[in-house]
Amino acid sequence: MTAPTTLSAKDVADKLDTDAKTLRVFLRAASIPKDEATNRYVFTAKDLPKLKKQFKEWREARIATTANHPMQNEEPAAARIAGHELSGAQHAYAAEHLIEEARSRKTSVSKLPNTIIHNVIEDALLEADDSDMSK
């Protein structure tokens, strides 16, 4: 009988629709042991169903935790709008709306598509223009 074919962490990450770095964070959080001989994570196809279930539960819990703590989203929000010429009020408006958008999509600000970022920045600029006209 032949030994089962092993899968690398990258192979497993691909199967779980994530990247290798996120998978390693999950594996450490779930206390999944490394192979003692190689000090690497080693999996077989037989391991995938259980890993998929555990990873899905971990990711959902992580998203819920992040969405409930706005401070965790403020720094990525600031980074995503850095480099745009926004006043302090426009910057605050854009950051707040990016955080709200990430919460509604149950994701992190850093994973929002660029189109969303640009739309929020345009809204922030328009909001400022509207408030200037009302004076």
Image (cartoon, rainbow, N blue to C red):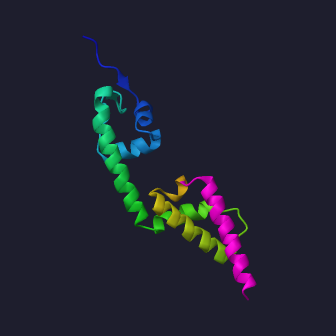
The residue drawn where x is 28% and y is 12% is 2
Number of marks? 0
- Quarter residue 129 falls in: bottom right
Q: Is residue 30 left or right of residue 108?
A: left
Above or below, 125 relative to 27:
below
Q: Nearer the viewer, residue 1 or 63?
A: 63
The residue drawn where x is 60% and y is 58% is 116
Does residue 51 show up magenta in the picture?
no
Q: Nearer the viewer, residue 105 or 62?
A: 105
Q: Is residue 107 left or right of residue 126?
A: left
Q: Residue 133: give x, y in percent of width and height.
A: 75, 83
Q: Is residue 110 left or right of residue 48?
A: right
Q: Residue 33: give x, y in percent of width and height.
A: 29, 38
- Quarter residue 89 falls in: bottom right
- Quarter residue 24 falls in: top left
Residues drawn in magenta: 112-135
Q: Residue 19: give x, y in percent of width and height.
A: 47, 40
Q: Is residue 11 left or right of residue 54?
A: right
User: What secondary structure prevails in the magenta region?
Assistant: helix
The residue drawn where x is 32% and y is 33% is 48
Above or below, 4 relative to 25:
above
Q: Nearer the viewer, residue 79 or 89?
A: 89
Tell me if I can see residue 29 in this picture: no
Q: Residue 57: give x, y in percent of width and height.
A: 32, 49
The residue drawn where x is 72% and y is 86% is 134
Tell me if I can see residue 8 in this picture: yes
Above or below, 36 relative to 111:
above
Quadrant in which the N terminus appears:
top left
Does residue 114 show up magenta in the picture?
yes
Quadrant in which the C terminus appears:
bottom right
